[in-house]
Amino acid sequence: MPKKNLFDPNPSGFIEHDANNDGIDRRGFLKCMAWAGTGALCTVQGGALKSFALGSRIDSHMRSHNMGELTFVQISDSHMGFNKPANPDVISTLKAAVDKINALPQQPEFLLHTGDISHLSKPEEFDNVDQILKSTNRELFFVPGEHDVLNDDGKSFRERYAKNSKGQGWYSFDKSGVHFVGLVNVMNLKAGGLGTLGPEQLEWLEDDVKHLKHSTPIVVFAHIPLWTVYPQWGWGTEDSAQALSYLKKKFGSVTVLNGHIHQTMQKVEGNVTFHTAFSTAFPQPAPGKADGPGPMKVPAEQLRRVLGITDVNYVQGRNALAVVDSSLV
Amino acid sequence: MSRKLFRAGLIAALPLAIAAVLILHPTGAKSEEASAPSTEVKVDNFTFGPESLTVAVNSTVTWVNKDDVPHVIASSDGLFKSKALDTDDKYSYTFAKAGTYAYYCSIHPKMVGKIIVQ
C-alpha cells in the first residue's frame, strides 16, 4: 500500500463533486464514510470534506477544542442479559467496545447510548452496563429502547438515566454550540404500528428549538429509526415526519442518530443526515433478508466485525457532522 | 358355527369391542381431553402461531415464547397484558366471554394476532 501523504486533503480520492455548491460533496461524503469503515475519519474542514487515517499524526493536530470542535461517540443496543447463540457473551463485546473508545486517538467528550441498554429491564443488567461504561470516564447520555421499559412504564429507567427529563424521558442539552435532543419513541406502541413520539413530546420539541439560532447544528438521538427503514419489521416512527418538520426548515445541519436495527445505515436528505449504529451485542439481518428481524447468528470469528461503535466529529462553522462507524475488529 | 368362522368373527369383533370400551370410558383427565382443539399459541420468529386461534368460551389460552427475544402479550384494548416473556416463559388468559380479541406484542407492535372465542 503506497504511503499516503497524511496532509493530503483527499487520500480516499472520493471527494470530487460539489453538486449543491455548498462545499459538501455528499456522494463523496457517503463514499468516504464507507471507506472509513476500515477505521478512518471523515471530517469537514474549511468547507471541504477531508479524510484522514485514524492513528495518524493529523489527529493530535485536530484535537483542538479551541477550534470549536466536538467529538463524541454513539453506542447502542448493548442488550445486557442476552445470552443466546447469536452472542453468548454480551459483556465481553461491550467491554471490547469500551476498549475501542478508550483507544480513540481523539478522545470523545461524552457518550450517547441510543437504547436497549438492557435485554429485560432488570436492575442487574443496567448495573452491569453502568459498571462497564464507567471505565470510559466520560459523561453518558441515554435514551431508552423498548427492552429498557418492560416493567414499569420506564420509571426505573428514567430514575437511572434521565433524571432531568420531561414526560417519558425526553430532554436536550448543548455542547460546544451543538444542540442535542434525546427523544423517546418506544412507549405506548400501538398494535400493528411503528415507533411513536406522541403529541406531548412533539409539542415539547417544537418549543425546545424555537429560540435557537438557525446556525445551530442539531443532533437528535432516539432508539427506533426516525425514518422508515423497513416498516414490515417495525423499523420506523409513525410521527417522525412531524418532528423533522420542526427542524429541517429552520436549521442548516440536522444529524439523526438511531439504533434498534443492529446494523449501520445512512441516508442523506437535504440538510438532514440519518444514521443507525451497530449493536455491541448481536447483529440483525438486513431488511427483508430473513423471516424476521431477530438476532442473526454469524460464525464466531466474524461476530466482532458486525458489532461496533460510532465516532462523530463536528467542527464549528461547518454544516455536516462527520459520522464514522467502526466495527470492534 | 364352525370354529374357523367363530374365531374370524371374534377377531373382527375385537376392534369394535375395544372402540366401545374407549367410548364408554374415555382416557385422559376430565378437563384436558386429548382430542380437544389446542389452546396454545406458539410465539416464534416474531410471529404468533397460529395468528388466529378459535377457542370455546371459558378456555384458557396459553402463549409460549419460543423466540430468542422477549415478547409482551397485550390485548389491543387493554383487557390483558403479560409481563415480559423471555424464551420458554408462558402466559395464560381465560376468556370467559364470546367475542374476537385482537392482541399484539407491545414491544414489537407489528406482531399481531387474534383469539376468537365462541
Image: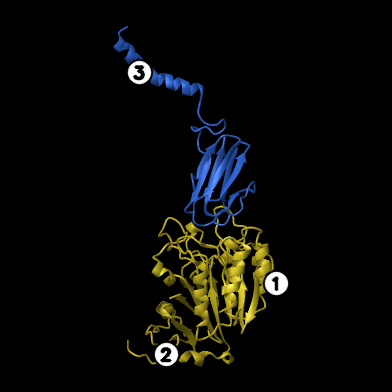
Chain colours: A yellow, B blue
- Dot 1: within a 10 Å radius of its alpha carbon, few (fewer than 14), some, or many (20 or more) residues? few
Q: Which mark is residue B32?
A: none
Q: Amino acid at mark 3?
A: Ile
| Labels 1, 2: front one | 1
Q: Secondary structure at mark 1?
A: loop
Circles 3 and 1 on the same subunit: no
- Label 1 belongs to which residue? A164
Query: Residue A171's quadrant in the figure?
Result: bottom right
Q: Do the numbered discs 1 and 2 sit on residues whose CB atoms are within 8 Å?
A: no
Asked whether the viewer can see residue A183, the reply is: no
Q: Secondary structure at mark 2?
A: loop
| Labels 3, 2: front one | 3
- Label 3 belongs to which residue? B11
Residue visible at 53% across and 76% down in the picture: A98
Q: Is residue A329 left or right of residue A194?
A: left
Q: Amino acid at mark 1?
A: Asn
- Dot 2: within a 10 Å radius of its alpha carbon, few (fewer than 14), some, or many (20 or more) residues? some
Q: Percent x, y for residue A43?
A: 48, 84
Asked whether the viewer can see residue A179, the reply is: yes
Q: Amino acid at mark 2?
A: Pro
Circles 3 and 2 on the same subunit: no
Instruction: Identify the chain of the residue marked 3, using the numbered disc in the image.
Output: B
Instruction: Identify the chain of the residue marked 2, using the numbered disc in the image.
Output: A
Instruction: Identify the chain of the residue marked 1, using the numbered disc in the image.
Output: A
Instruction: Relative to A154, say whether A327 is above or below.
Output: below
In front: B54, or A13?
Answer: B54
- Label 2 belongs to which residue? A9
**How many angstroms separate mark 1 from mark 2 (CA)?**
42 Å
| Labels 3, 1: front one | 3
